[in-house]
Image (cartoon, helix red, strand yellow):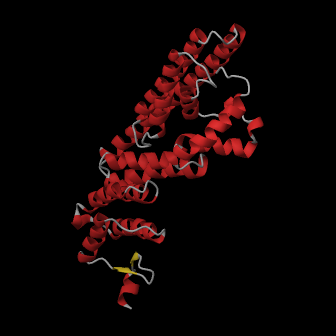
Amino acid sequence: MVAVEDWKNQLYEKTQIAVKYSPAKYKPAYKIMRTRGIENYEIDDMDVTFISEVIHKCSYIFPSKVETRKAIEQLTEDRNVNGHSDENEECEELYRYAFLSLTNLQRFIDTVDEWETDIPDEIRLEYRQRYSAEIIEMQKSIDEERIDQVQRTKDMDKDIQRILSSDDRLKTWCDVIKIYMDRSFVIDHNIELYQEFILRASTAGIIHAHGQAADYYLNTDKNCDEAEKRMRLLMEDKDNLSAGDVHSIMSAISMYMIRGNVLSDGLEDVVVTLINWGYPIEKDSTGVYVMLSKREKSL
C-alpha cells in the first residue's frame, strides 16, 4: 500500500476524529495506535476492514487505483461472510468459503502488482512472490484437512450404518461409542471427534445418541430449540423410555440452569411432561430442576 510521507500522524488525526462517529470501523485501530504509540504503528497492524476504510476515505494519505479499491472491497466482504459463518455448516461449504477467499486474496495481489505501478517494481515483485507462496501453502493445508475430514466422515457413517443394521443396536452402540470415547478422551485428548459422532448419530436416528446430543446443543452450543428437538426424539417412545434416558435429559437441563440460564418454554414443557409421566423431578432450594432418586422421593 502506497502511503504519503508523515502518513502516521495524518492517519492518527483522521482516526481521532472518525472514531467518534464510526467507532465500529475505527475504534480497534485507534486503541492500537494509543497503546503502542503512533510512531510504532505500522500498516501490518491494520486489519482488512480498516485498510478498506482508509483506502476509500483517506486517498490523500493512501492513494490507490480504483481496481485496487474494488479488489479490497471483495476481501472485506469475504471477511464478513467468513466471520459470520455458522460452525454447524457442512464442512464442504466451509472449505468452499476458504478456497474462494484465498482465490480473491490472490486476485488482490495480482491487482496490486498490475495497477499500483507507483510502487517500485522490485517491491511489487517481492510482495507478489512472498504472499503468493503463502497462499499456495494455505491451499495445500486446507486441501489436506479436507481430505482428512472426508475420510473421517466416511468412517463415522460406516459406524452409524453398522449400528442401524445391527440386530442388537444397544450393544453395538455401546461397542462403537466406547471406541470414540477412548480415542477422544484417552488417546487424542480432543472431544471434537466424540461430539461430531454423537451429533451425526443422533441426526441419523440412533435413539441412544439423542440424550448426549441434547446435552451438547444445550450446554455447549446454547441452542435450546435443537436441544428440545433431540429430547423429544428420545421421548417419542414413552413405553421404552428408560430412567437413564430421563436422567440424561434432566442432567443436561439441571446443568443449564445451574449456569444461570432460564429454560425456554419448550424445555419447560419437556420437564412438565416428564413430571406428568410420573418421574420424580422437583426444583431444589436454588430453583433448579433435579431428578430425585426413589429414596429421596420417599423421604
Instruction: Decide if residue 289 is on the left or right side of residue 116.
Output: left
Residue 233 is left or right of residue 8, and the answer is left
Q: Is residue 14 something that shows in the picture?
A: yes
User: Whole-percent x and y of residue 81?
Assistant: 44, 35
Horizontal placement of 92 versus 21: left or right? left
Number of on-image labels: 0
- State whether residue 42 appears in this view: no
Q: Is residue 134 above or below residue 123?
A: below
Q: In this view, does 134 lie to the left or right of 298?
A: right
- In the image, 193 versus 49, the foreground residue is 49
Residue, far bottom: 299
Q: Indicate the position of residue 154 as horizontal and vertical percent values.
A: 41, 34
Tell me what residue is drawn at x 36 percent, y 43 percent: 160
Vertical placement of 127 versus 163: above or below?
above
As rendered, which of 232 and 207 lies closer to the eye?
Answer: 232
Image location of residue 235, percent across then percent down: 26, 63
Q: Which of 297 and 122 is in front in this view?
A: 122
Q: Looking at the rendering, in which quadrant would you find the C terminus? A: bottom left
Instruction: Check the picture and name the quadrant holding the N terminus.
Output: top right
Locate residue 85: give its quadrant: top left
Question: Which of 191/93 is in front?
Answer: 93
Report the residue that reaches farthest toward the right: 39
